[in-house]
């Protein structure tokens, strides 16, 4: 199969005859760069090679600054570097100069994302820039960076490619925001349980506080980064089924070995679907897993592609997978590349894989039991229903226990919950039993109940916290920290997690925990202060550097890259930060004066 030329690239090719005529003028002949080379910038965008596109755009700005392709390419680069206001403005300039609609089609989503992410804070590390709503989501930052750095190193090694420059990550306060900034609808998210994406050269995830009981958000971050790595390694030629299979299989590598991302329940469901002939064809997974009809379908599809990648890796190892991606980057189809590496057609390999599913043993995994169904909250910080999904009979037992507990009859409440768990086997009932038993100081029953809840549902943070409490009481701090780490990986917004970390953690962990408790109490939850009015600047600087302003120890992200849009702010002295895609930030002091004409700020100049 021949890989179809991407849409942007086709649009640029259609422009080339006109552009070639324009080059006959003496003015264009004097330029070193021609339109064919400029057009390669759009091809690089489609191939997820944003660094290459940026380099071409830098030359185009210097040599063909007013060409509609240059203006459209700058808009694309800004969009793919998360400068949404700049993208909208440069797309508009391109439109005015006659760029075709296909080249500026991202303008509406850029504008929607600008509105949705206005006022976001930014955290900068060597390899990542994390954008988030000021406040509680800052708790995620150190754990997110740790996850991303490990995933970049380990998964990049497995697949033979790593991003060379900083990757933007955005954490959204609700699943509704994810719909606002993407091509997904609210219905897609609800039906499929999709709460994260990798698109436009950035990773996009929903905050775990917006999902009932949270979710495995650290594995999800790793999963989305794996998509970025796959796209870079293959020049964005990998079909959805292969993309999702590699990402799902590799996502656990940040915390251990790859191939540890499928729960026992998913493995059993996959085996049963294979026996009944109910597998989902790979082609039905196009154009996105998020378009499947239900969370059950989505889960089964992920299980299928996960085990097919497992099958391929067992045959030829990660060297074989790297070779498949490398061959696809040169233009081979998935069928051609896989057959070249494995010596068998994709059809034949699929048949052999399907035969193995009916008798495939359920493998031990860190994700035991039944994964929770993704339930999007109406409000991000709404309290979780502690008995969500529990049967009516189980709820009656639980309510009776609650009444007994409130009347001070704690032992009787515990007995009622023991009967409820025996009747229902619900992990949520077991989690509740663990907390009540802990209140009666029945540590044995509490620990047993907490472990049963964890075994029954791997995506519950509450039982991990209860287990950690018991372990701290028993002086087993190292084991307690493992349970707390699991809780953080699902839902770190429970203050009890961080209170226990202060007792059980090392010095670094205690500092993190105290900061988290401050955020949960609202001590550092202030929104970003507006820049004010009276003066204006436009930062030209080194091209495509991220712009920050610092004043009185407060670093204010502008959400822009150079050349920036107009920044309105109050007059005074500021420290200007320019953070390049790779390397250390550059700083200088600027003085903003009152006036209606923007001051041009460039690094070669001193003062302003």
Image (cartoon, helix red, strand yellow):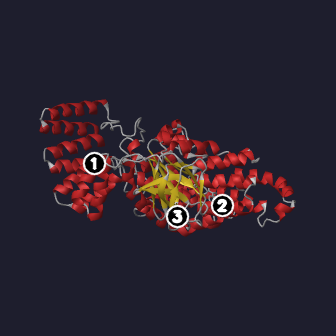
Residue count near mark 1 (Cα–Cα under 10 Å), binned few <14, some 14–19, many ≥20:
some
Kindly state the secondary structure of the residue where label 3 is placed.
helix
Residue 29 coordinates in the image, percent (x, y): 84, 64
Q: Can residue 66 be seen by looking at this rendering?
A: yes
Q: CA distance from mark 1 to mark 2?
A: 45 Å
Kindly state the secondary structure of the residue where label 2 is placed.
helix
Q: Is residue 112 above or below residue 339?
A: above
Q: Are marks 3 and 1 in contact (CB under 8 Å)?
A: no
| Residue nearest the viewer, comparing 220 with 114 | 114
Residue 473 coordinates in the image, percent (x, y): 16, 55
Provide the residue designation for mark 1. Answer: 495
Kindly state the secondary structure of the residue where label 1 is placed.
helix
Residue 82 coordinates in the image, percent (x, y): 56, 52
Please give the name of the residue rendered at 43% of the width and 59% of the height, measured from the top-left corner.
252
Q: CA distance from mark 3 to mark 2?
A: 32 Å
Q: CA distance from mark 3 to mark 1?
A: 41 Å
Provide the residue designation for mark 2. Answer: 53
Q: Which label sits on residue 313?
A: 3
Q: Can residue 1 be seen by looking at this rendering?
A: no
Q: Is residue 407 above or below residue 85?
A: above
């Amino acid at each position: 199969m021949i890989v179809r030329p991407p849409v942007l690239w086709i649009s640029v090719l259609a422009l080339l005859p006109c552009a070639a005529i324009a080059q006959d003028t003496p003015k264009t002949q004097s330029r070193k760069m021609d339109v064919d080379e400029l057009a390669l910038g759009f091809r690089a965008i489609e191939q997820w090679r944003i660094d290459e596109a940026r380099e071409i755009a830098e030359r185009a700005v210097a040599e063909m600054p007013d060409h509609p392709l240059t203006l459209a390419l700058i808009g694309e680069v800004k969009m793919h570097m998360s400068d949404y206001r700049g993208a909208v403005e440069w797309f508009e300039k391109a439109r005015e100069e006659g760029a075709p609609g296909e080249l500026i089609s991202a303008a509406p989503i850029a504008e929607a994302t600008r509105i949705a992410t206005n006022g976001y804070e930014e955290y900068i590390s060597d390899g990542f820039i994390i954008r988030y709503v000021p406040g509680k989501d800052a708790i995620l930052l150190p754990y997110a960076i740790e996850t991303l750095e490990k995933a970049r190193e380990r998964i990049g090694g497995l697949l033979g490619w790593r991003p060379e420059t900083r990757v933007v990550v955005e954490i959204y306060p609700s699943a509704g925001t994810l719909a606002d900034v993407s091509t997904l609808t609210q219905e897609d998210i609800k039906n499929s349980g999709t709460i994260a994406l990798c698109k436009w050269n950035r990773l996009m995830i929903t905050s775990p506080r917006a999902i009932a009981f949270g979710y495995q958000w650290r594995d999800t971050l790793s999963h989305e980064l794996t998509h970025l790595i796959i796209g870079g390694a293959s020049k964005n030629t990998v079909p959805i089924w292969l993309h999702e299979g590699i990402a799902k299989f590799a996502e656990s590598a940040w915390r251990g070995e790859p191939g540890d991302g499928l729960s026992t329940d998913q493995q059993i469901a996959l085996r049963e679907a294979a026996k009944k002939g109910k597998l989902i064809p790979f082609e039905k997974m196009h154009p996105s897993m998020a378009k499947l009809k239900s969370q059950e379908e989505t889960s089964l599809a992920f299980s299928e592609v996960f085990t097919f990648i497992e099958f391929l890796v067992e045959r030829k190892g990660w060297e074989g997978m790297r070779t498949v991606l490398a061959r696809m980057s040169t233009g081979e189809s998935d069928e051609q590349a896989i057959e070249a590496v494995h010596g068998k057609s994709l059809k034949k390999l699929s048949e052999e894989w399907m035969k193995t599913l009916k008798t495939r043993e359920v493998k031990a995994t860190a994700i035991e039991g039944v994964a929770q169904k993704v339930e999007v909250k109406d409000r991000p910080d709404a309290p979780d229903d502690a008995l969500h999904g529990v049967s009516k009979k189980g709820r009656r037992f639980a309510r009776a226990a609650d009444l007994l507990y409130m009347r001070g009859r704690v032992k009787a409440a515990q007995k009622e919950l023991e009967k409820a768990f025996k009747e229902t086997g619900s992990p949520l009932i077991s989690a509740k039993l663990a907390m009540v038993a802990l209140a009666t100081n029945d540590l044995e029953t509490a620990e047993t109940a907490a472990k049963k809840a964890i075994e029954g549902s791997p995506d519950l943070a509450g039982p991990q916290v209860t287990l950690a409490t018991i372990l701290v009481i028993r002086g087993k701090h190292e084991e307690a920290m493992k349970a707390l780490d699991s809780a953080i990986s699902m839902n770190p917004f429970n203050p009890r997690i961080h209170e226990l970390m202060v007792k059980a953690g090392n010095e670094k962990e205690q500092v993190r925990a105290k900061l988290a408790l401050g955020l949960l109490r609202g001590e550092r939850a202030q929104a970003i202060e507006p820049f004010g009015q009276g003066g204006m600047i436009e930062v030209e600087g080194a091209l495509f550097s991220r712009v920050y302003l610092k004043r009185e120890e407060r670093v204010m992200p502008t959400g822009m890259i150079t050349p920036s849009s107009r920044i309105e702010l109050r007059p005074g002295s500021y420290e200007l930060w320019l953070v390049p895609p790779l390397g250390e930030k550059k700083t200088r002091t600027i003085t903003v004066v009152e006036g209606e004409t923007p001051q041009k700020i460039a690094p070669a100049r001193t003062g302003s």
